[in-house]
């Protein structure tokens, strides 16, 4: 049986005056990598994608064929003149992408006629319409409004295979995940699987921390899980 796996073996990344140390194994499932702005999340994502060199250590990938790095800013991904061309460039079925009320009848529009939030939602829909053995999402919630964040979370919850890594400092609306990691003082820390990881998560949103102090630990970190825990108080 082939098991996809991403292994960071005593990795050190140095960029200017910043250094990041990472060691750990990522298996199939959805992983949250949290950290403050400037903590090194994007740097780690680039290294995992093989786009920047390592100072030391190694990154190995077992049975990982197709992979994707989603950048924070959607403009970096655009190659088509129209939304229809852009959709086709991702290999997506237009019927699925343009069934959304926001996009219906807009196939011939320029991608750059959309707001940044609309463009982000569009290309994330294209990404989630595909299968990747390794999916790296750098700040996928940026530029999205609350409803769009919830739509993204539902899409992420439908991923059943492969390794999905979500690099974000989002604090309000998050998807259910299988494992939590966080970057603190230039070191990647493994907080473990859910739900136990929640108690060890130093960068947990303030509402989750408040629920923990009340003894009402959410089963997971999604909006629905947090609301359910809050209703137990």
Image (tube, grey):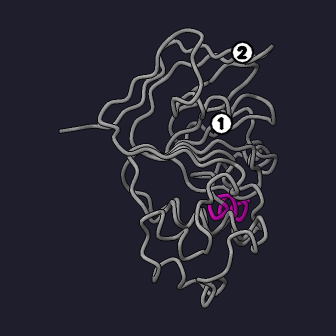
- Classed neighbour count for the residue bearing mark 1: other residues with Cα under 10 Å, few (<14), some (14–19), many (≥20): some
Q: Position of residue 231 (x, y in %)?
A: 71, 65
**Residue 163 seen in the current view:** no
Mark 2 and mark 1 in contact? Answer it, CB < 8 Å.
no
Question: Would residue 228 be counted in the magenta stretch?
Answer: yes
Residue lying farthest top? Answer: 56
- Classed neighbour count for the residue bearing mark 2: other residues with Cα under 10 Å, few (<14), some (14–19), many (≥20): some
Residue positioned 63% across, 40% down in the render: 198
Disc assigned to residue 19: 2
| Count of residue discs | 2
Instruction: Please give the range of residues in magenta.
Output: 223-233
Residue at numbered disc 1: 199
Question: Would residue 101 be counted in the magenta stretch?
Answer: no
Left or right: 208, with 189 as reference point? right
Residue closer to the observer: 80 or 176: 80
Tell me the chief SS of the magenta region.
Answer: helix
Residue lying farthest bottom? Answer: 105
Mark pair 2, 1: CA separation: 27 Å
Left or right: 105, with 184 as reference point? left
Residue positioned 45% across, 66% down in the render: 129
Which is nearer the N-term, disc 2 or disc 1?
2
């Amino acid at each position: 049986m082939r098991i996809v796996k991403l292994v960071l073996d005593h990795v050190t990344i140095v960029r200017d005056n910043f250094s990041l140390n990472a060691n750990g194994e990522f298996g199939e499932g959805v992983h949250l990598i949290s950290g403050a702005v400037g903590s090194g999340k994007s740097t780690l994502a680039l290294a995992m994608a093989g786009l920047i060199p390592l100072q030391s250590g190694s990154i190995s990938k077992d049975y990982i064929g197709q992979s994707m790095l989603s950048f924070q800013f959607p403009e970096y991904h655009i190659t088509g003149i129209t939304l229809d061309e852009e959709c086709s460039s991702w290999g997506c079925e237009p019927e699925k992408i343009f069934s959304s009320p926001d996009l219906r009848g807009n196939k011939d529009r320029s991608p750059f006629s959309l707001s940044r939030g609309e463009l982000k939602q569009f290309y994330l829909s294209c990404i989630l319409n595909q299968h990747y053995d390794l999916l790296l999402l750098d700040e996928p919630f940026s530029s999205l409004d609350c409803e769009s964040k919830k739509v993204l979370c539902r899409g992420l919850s439908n991923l059943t295979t492969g390794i999905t890594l979500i690099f974000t400092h989002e604090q309000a609306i998050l998807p259910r995940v299988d494992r939590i990691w966080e970057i603190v003082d230039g070191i990647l820390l493994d907080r473990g699987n859910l739900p136990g990881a929640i108690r060890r998560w130093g960068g947990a949103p303030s509402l989750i921390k408040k629920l923990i102090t009340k003894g009402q630990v959410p089963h997971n970190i999604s909006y629905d899980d947090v609301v359910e825990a809050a209703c137990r108080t």
